[in-house]
Structures are given as structure tokens and as C-alpha cells.
Amino acid sequence: MDTLFKTIALVGKYESAVACGSLSRLNAWLTRAGYRVLVTPETVGLCGAGEAQLATIAEMGEQADLVIVLGGDGTMLHVARHLAGFEVPMIGVNQGRLGFLADVPIDTMLPTLAKMLAGEAQIEERILLDCRVEDHDAVVLQTHAFNDVVVSKGAQGRLIEFEVYIDGQFVYSQRADGLVVATPTGSTAYALSAGGPILHPTLAAVVLAPICPHTLSARPIAVGSQFEIEINLIHAADARVHFDGQDHGDLAVGQRVIIRRAPKSVRLLHPVDHNYYDTLRQKLHWGEKL
């Protein structure tokens, strides 16, 4: 058995049996190779455990040398947010659609992973966001975001009004459908649809992209990663804040969303021949060389 990794955690797509066949096959393969394998209780409920040991996501963060996620980018986001602070390397096996994060093809899973477990892999550090919602001096919600934080109008569909400060300096007030604050990882998601730029995933920066602003001169901006972004809700009939499209909370006038770079990063492992620009060409249907 290779000494780079001794304990490997497996996580399948939440409440989905789609990944069960591949997960069971990978579990058996790793066990035969002598690795200690951990799986979540939710995975066992759907797929069984084989010879793997039960562990919560938090226990995986404490005990695992590596986490392999079988699913899509949404599953990767979910696991990354819940492993925040542990800096356990993650590998994504793509059983979803886009595969920006989960980039190991399911049809070559075992030979690709064999090389990666033997050390033939690229490691990539990506920034994570610490987020909280404050009501005066009280913290009413606190979480992490790997892709983006979105402050937006709610069910009533009316424009909201907010102010943005960066490092205590006033940037602008805006009436809009909302604002996306995206990491480089999230720059190819909602922020891209809102007209934001694509940031290379290793950049230490974030994008602020207004969503359908009332002022047509409002444009996305990028700022360095040593920041504190404050979004104050000034007027809204109905507003919400979303974290990676997975967690959300209602926002009331007078509340503010505070966003900082988390002290620890997300660590991703890619195959040794991984090329981010190849991924962009494939996923965004860019042209090849003429």
C-alpha cells in the first residue's frame, strides 16, 4: 500500500442511489489494496458499507488523509463546505453534468485513481469564504461558501436596495435583483451569467457581480483576497441570502452580510495531465485552434 494516503473517505451524492455501483466498486478496490475506508451513514443507508467504517463528515475531516467524492460539482461544493477548516485533499469523480470540480471521468475511475494515489497528481489550493449575517451586533447566521454568496430579491420579485463596503470603504449603493460575490471557483457559475469575468481558480481574488442592476453603468469588479465585504440591506419587500445555492436565509432591512476569506483553503487533487483551459474549452464550448 502506498504511504501517501492510509485512510480514505468516500462520499456519494446526497440521498441519491446513482453513485452506489461505482462507490461500492471503489470501496472494494480500496479495501483490497489495504486502505482504511470511511463512508458516511447516509451512504451506507443507500449503498451498504462493505468493509468500510462509518464516519460523519466531521470525523472524516479529522481522520481521513483523502476524501473521494462521487457525484457532481454540487456534491463537491457540499462536501468542501462541511470539511472547511480541515484542509483534507479532495478528489472528485464526475457523475454529474458539468464537472468543473469533479474531473475524474467515471469510465476511467480506477486506473486514474491508481495513478493519483501513487503520487501522480496535481494539488490545487482554492480560497473559501467565511460568511455571516448580522442584525446590529447579533450574528443570526454563520456559514462557509466555496462558490458564491448571493444576496437577491425574494419571492415577491421586486428590486432590492443595498450598499456595498469593502474594507470599510464605501463602494456604491445599488438597486438591483441582487449581487453575487464569487470566488474564482464560482466565477464560472452564477457570476458568469451575471456578466462577471472568469478567474483562474488559483487566484486569490473574488468577483462582485450585480444581478440586473437598475443603473446600467454598474459593472462587475474583482478585489484581492485580503478583504472584508459588507452588504447592507437598505430597502426590500423581500430578500434572501444564498450560500453555494445550498443554504439560504431571509434578510431583513437593516441586516448586513459580512464576507471574508476563510483562514484555510480547499485542497483539490487533479490528474497529472489536468489542464484548466481544456476544461473551459470543453464545458463552455469554446473553439479549438484554427
Image: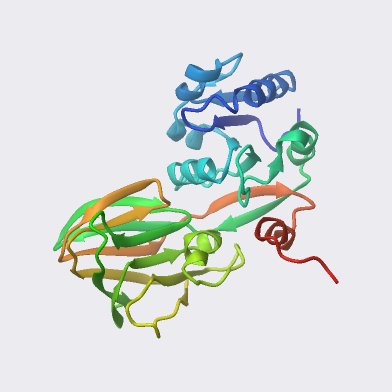
Residue 262 visible at all: no
- In the displayed structure image, the side of residue 259 where residue 100 appears, left or right: right
- Residue 57 place in picture, x, y as percent: 46, 33
Applied colour scheme: rainbow
Left or right of 133 in this view: 110? right
Image quarter (top left, top right, bottom left or bottom right) of the N terminus: top right
Query: Which of the two residues, 94 or 203, is positioned nearer the viewer here?
Result: 94
Please state if 217 lies on the left or on the right of 152 as rendered: right
In this rendering, the answer to whether 88 lies above or below 128 is: above
- Tell which of 144 and 181 is nearer to you: 181
Query: Disc count in the image?
Result: 0
Q: Position of residue 100 (x, y in %)?
A: 62, 52
Q: Which of the 4 image quadrants contains residue 64?
A: top right
Outermost residue, right side: 290
Q: Residue 223: where, in percent of width, then height?
A: 46, 76
Q: Quadrant of the C terminus?
A: bottom right
Along the line of sight, the residue nearer the viewer: 72 or 59? 72
In the current view of this chain or complex, which residue is farthest to the front?
Answer: 157
Q: Is residue 185 visible?
A: yes
For the point 30% across and 82% down, the residue is 172
Which residue is the extreme one toward the bottom?
A: 217
Which of 230/137 is in front? 230
**Relative to 46, 151 lies left or right:** left
Q: From what the image shows, is residue 210 above or below residue 216? A: above
Residue 97: x and y in percent read 61, 44
Q: Residue at x 63, y 41 (%)?
A: 92
- The residue at the point 60 percent across, 24 percent down is 37
